Image: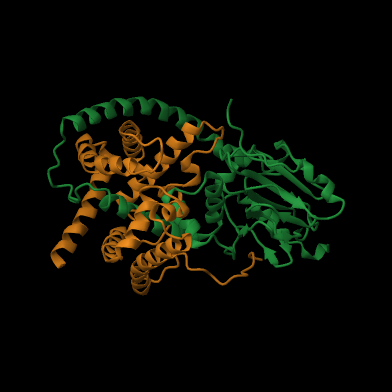
Chain colours: A orange, B green
Amino acid sequence: MYQSGVKERLAHDEWAAVMHKIASDQDRKAFAKLFAHFSPKIKSFCMMLRSQHTSPQMADELVQDVMIKVWTKAEYFNSDKASVSTWIFTIARNCRTDYLRKLKRTETPLVADDLWPMAEEEAPFASLEQHRIEKNIHHALTLLPPEQAEALKQIYISGKTHAEVASALGLPLGTVKSRVRLAIAKLRISMSELLAEESEAEPTDATGSSKAAGAELEP
Amino acid sequence: MSDSMQQPNANNNSVNQPTSRAPTMPRLHPDIHWLIDYAAGTLPLSHALCVAAHTEYCSSCQSKVRELSAIGGSLMSTDTGTSNAAEPSASEELNEDESEALNKLWAAIEQAKVAQSDTDATRPVDQANHVNTLQSETTAALPTCVKKLLPDTMEQLNWKKLGRHLSVTQLASGDTQREVALHRIHPGRGVANHDHKGEEVTVVLRGSFSDQKGIYLPGDFLVMQAGHSHQPVASGDMECICLSVLDAPIKFTGPINRLMNPFLKIHPSPAPA
């Protein structure tokens, strides 16, 4: 529906605006708003992790870790590169990884932010408005067959490997892999349609399309 | 091997511009399932290190990872069983527990600020490193995620010889199941034919090598399954440095090299006492 599309778009822009207020003015009210909306999502994301360590205490600690990062790194949030929810997802994913790594108490100088660099540290990306991508993903997710959506959810939210999903669902590994591959292909098509549209409108090479292999160093 | 394969520019380039990567896109990429697991955060740390290293060379996989992360963002905001009142303008009252959590959070943020200013103070060192190490054999041109595990120069690493032309040094990746190492092959020299007893992931970081199947350039991401046997040779006059992650020790298959097999034990990251 046209109406709801506009609303959704507005919502994405508004969350980005809230982030900018936090970044530029250290606006505590804006942060409280963001906290009210996202902390339950982060908490249930953490609670759904399939791990022997999952507990409400762990989830609360992680919510705190994530929200501290949101506050201290707010200036790095770039609405051209990621929506607020994607940005927060990557922070939550990294905090969750670090939490589990610390429990194992292995010695390494690596932290999750080294292995999963956050968007702000990566190379420049297309100026494609991120909320359009997100909107399309939201929509494409609702169109997925339930078994494909379930497989994706188990991987992204419950943090299971493909093999763990297979044994949880009592399916052969190959079946799970093909469900995931099909789901991702559909979601990526919905994104690449946007990317194609964008590059027609504005010819840039920033989408990472591969150049001819074998290009030499400049003379 | 002939000296005619040398590429004088390659060396200068990598030293003078530590952050610049090979001008060509890598030819071999991680399978989409690797990238999905990477974006979802379920890859083992050592494998995540390989994917992260590859994406520093590969803008195509970088943008795939970005798309796959956006799927995670979407799933988190819709599929976690909470209301999806997406508008910030909608009033979202904090209940008592949440207000308390927010208060605790402000206290924690105050503490984090102190810690933050400490890390800010140390940050410029990073850039100084690039300058200091230009003269020496530098690690600066290697991917950022790998550099985090390395001292400033290659000489400071504890290299073990595995044959005449191959040396290896273990890295503390925090993965207790797999061995993470840098392999270094002398320019134009080969490594004895060997089998892989477990899966091995290799990312070429500098130089290049070839085997029976082809040539592998910086950023190339290879997964060798158990039972695969090959005989890599470094190209040209440049030594080849690879990141490798091993599930189980490799086994040399030549008659003399076979004597070395007892010494090839896997060295995963040490677990603390």
Residue for point 64% across, 50% down: B244
From what the image shows, is residue A197 above or below residue A88?
Answer: below
Residue for point 34% across, 54% down: A153
Q: What is the residue that sits farthest to the front in this orientation?
A: A170
Residue A52 relative to residue B199: left or right: left
From what the image shows, is residue B134 above or below residue B217?
Answer: above
Tell me where residue A118 appears, x and y as whole percent. Answer: 42, 47
Residue B50 relative to residue B103: left or right: right
The residue closer to the viewer here, A118 or A56, is: A56
Q: In which quarter of the image is the C terminus of chain B?
A: top right
Q: In which quarter of the image is the N terminus of chain B?
A: bottom right
Tell me where residue B77 appears, x and y as whole percent. Answer: 27, 50
Residue B143 relative to residue A29: left or right: right
Q: What is the residue that sits farthest to the bottom in this orientation?
A: A200
| Image quadrant assignment for residue A136 | bottom left
Residue B164 visible in rendering? no
